[in-house]
Each structure stands twice: as structure tokens, then as C-alpha cells.
Amino acid sequence: MTRFRQLSAGFTLLEVLVAFVMLAAVLGVILRINAQVLEGTHRASERQLALMLAQSQLDRVLANAELEPGQLRGDLTIPGYRWELDVSPLQAAEQVPDAERLRVTPYQIDLHVYWAEQQHLVLSTLRLGRSL
């Protein structure tokens, strides 16, 4: 009877190794999930920053009373972020009632913000400008 107690008093080396392997596998999965969550949060943060910068730049452009067709580009205040602006007469301008009588031209304004590799965001709006 004493001999049976001595044999069952602890875990075998194999049981301990299996427990460590299972623990390592679970920790590996948890760390991988944590890394994916952090990467997703970082991407969302970059996109939110790009959206705020784009809205700010678009507000600056729209504060200018005179809209002219063309393209502009430049760097934003945060390093690594740049913008491009396209101002073009609206293709469906003939559908705007009384545009000729009021001497206004509808413009489509597209502001592109680029950052990192192959990341970009586009804000588009329509505004009325004076006819040329």
C-alpha cells in the first residue's frame, strides 16, 4: 500500500511536458490575437487622423471664395501625409436650374489624402462658383 502512494504522489515528466506544450500553444494564440487587435487599432487611428486632416484641408480650400478648375497638391502638417485636390466643373451642370441666369457654375471638389504605403482617403463635395 505504501508503494502505491509513492507512485501516485506527483505528475510524471510526460504529463508536465504536455501541460507546458498546451500552455505554450494557448499563449501563442492569445499573443497573435493581441497583435492583430493592436494592428487594427493602429490602422483605425491612422485613418481617423487622415480624415481629420482631410476635413481641415477641405475647409481651408472652401474658405477661398474663388473656385477655379485645376489641381493642387501639398504636404500636410503631419509628416508622411500628403494631399491632392481636384476641382472640376460638374459634369451634370446643365441639370442645375437657373445656373446660367444666376451666373454660377457647379464644381465637384475631390480631396485625396495619402499616407503610408497604398493608403488613401477621398473626400468629395459640390460647391457653386462664379461663372467665367
Image: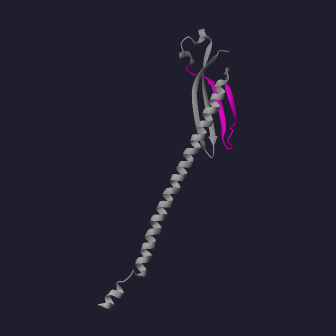
Q: Looking at this rendering, what residue extends furthest in the top direction?
A: 101
- Percent x, y for residue 115? 63, 43
Which residue appears at 40% of the width and 81% of the height?
Answer: 12
Of 123 and 30, the residue lying toward us: 30
Left or right, residue 80 beside residue 125: right
- Residue 88 screen position, x and y as percent: 63, 24
> Please, which residue is most extreme toward the left here?
1
Q: Residue at x 49, y 64 (%)?
A: 28
- First to last magenta residue range: 69-92
Depth check: 67 or 61 in front? 61
Colouring used for the render: one colour
Quadrant into which the C terminus falls: top right
- Whether 82 is among the magenta residues is yes
Residue 123 inside the magenta-drawn segment:
no
Determine the residue positioned at 55% across, 20% down. Answer: 92
Q: Quadrant of residue 13?
A: bottom left
Residue 3 falls in image quadrant: bottom left
Q: Quadrant of the N terminus?
A: bottom left
The correct choice, above or below, for 78 with respect to 130 in the image is below
The percent position of residue 93, horizontal first and vertical second, equals 57, 18
Instruction: Please identify the quarter of the rendering in which residue 22 is found.
Output: bottom left
Residue 103 vertical position relative to residue 22 in the rendered view, above or below: above
